[in-house]
Image (cartoon, helix red, strand yellow):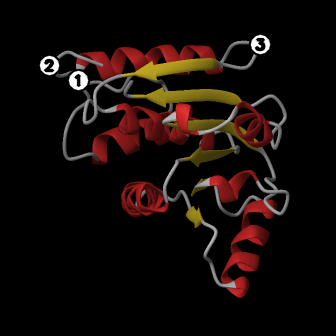
Amino acid sequence: LQGEERIERPVCSDALMTTFLDQLPFRLTAAQSRVLKDICHDMTASSPMNRLIQGDVGCGKTIVAMSAAVRVCSTGQQAAFMVPTELLAEQHYRNFRTRLEAIGIRVALIRGGMRAKEKREILAAVAEGAIQVVIGTHAIFQNTVRFARLGFVVIDEQHRFGVLQRKALVEKGSRPDVLVMTAT
């Protein structure tokens, strides 16, 4: 995702995406915009997307993935972000919640050490589709987590998860698009 040229126009023709990109305090770089455009194109194909984004830490992989999640949510589907550590999950949750709830997309964090009542409430809201974006660690591919309409799966630092773990999350949807991110 290298490239410093800034663009001024949204890359996907979607009203919610335009609103999201307009509310960012920065513009996507040309490289970020190109990757997002490719992802949006892949999401309209008849077969599920299976794409890898590789880039240095801080190059903007997460904002591209978040933008793609907005695109998916605008179609009434849900997105799941699986990350390797609770610290990263909490950081993503705070960032996603700030940016996405401003445009009406509900975000939840699922992690292993949650209180039982809180976890039950979140799991029910995810299963009903009331929560559109779920961020979590290994906890999100457990049997207790059910999605109403999972359409997009993001696996951050995919090398930190086993093949069966990644498969368990993807199988929670009906042929969801998959985006894998890595810095290595």
Q: Residue 119 bears which disc, if any?
A: none
Q: Which residue is nearer to you in this view: 87 or 42?
A: 87
Q: Residue 29 bears which disc, if any?
A: 1
Q: Residue at x 17, y 22 (%)?
A: 6
Q: Are marks 3 and 1 in contact (CB under 8 Å)?
A: no
Q: Residue 46 bears which disc, if any?
A: 3
Q: Earlier in the sequence, mark 3 or mark 2?
A: 2
Q: Which residue is nearer to you in this view: 63 or 70?
A: 63
In three-dimensional space, the C-alpha distance between marks 3 and 1, rounded to whole angstroms, equals 28 Å
Q: Amino acid at mark 1?
A: Thr
Q: Nearer the viewer, mark 3 or mark 2?
A: 2
To which quarter of the image does residue 126 belong? bottom right
Dot 2, crowdedness within 10 Å: few (<14), some or many (≥20)? few
Q: Which residue is nearer to you in this view: 140 or 69?
A: 140
Q: Amino acid at mark 2?
A: Glu
Question: Residue 81 location in percent, x, y?
Answer: 57, 46
Mark 3 element type: loop
Question: Residue 72 location in percent, x, y?
Answer: 61, 37
Q: Is residue 160 above or below residue 4?
A: below
Q: Residue 4 bears which disc, if any?
A: 2
Q: Amino acid at mark 3?
A: Ser
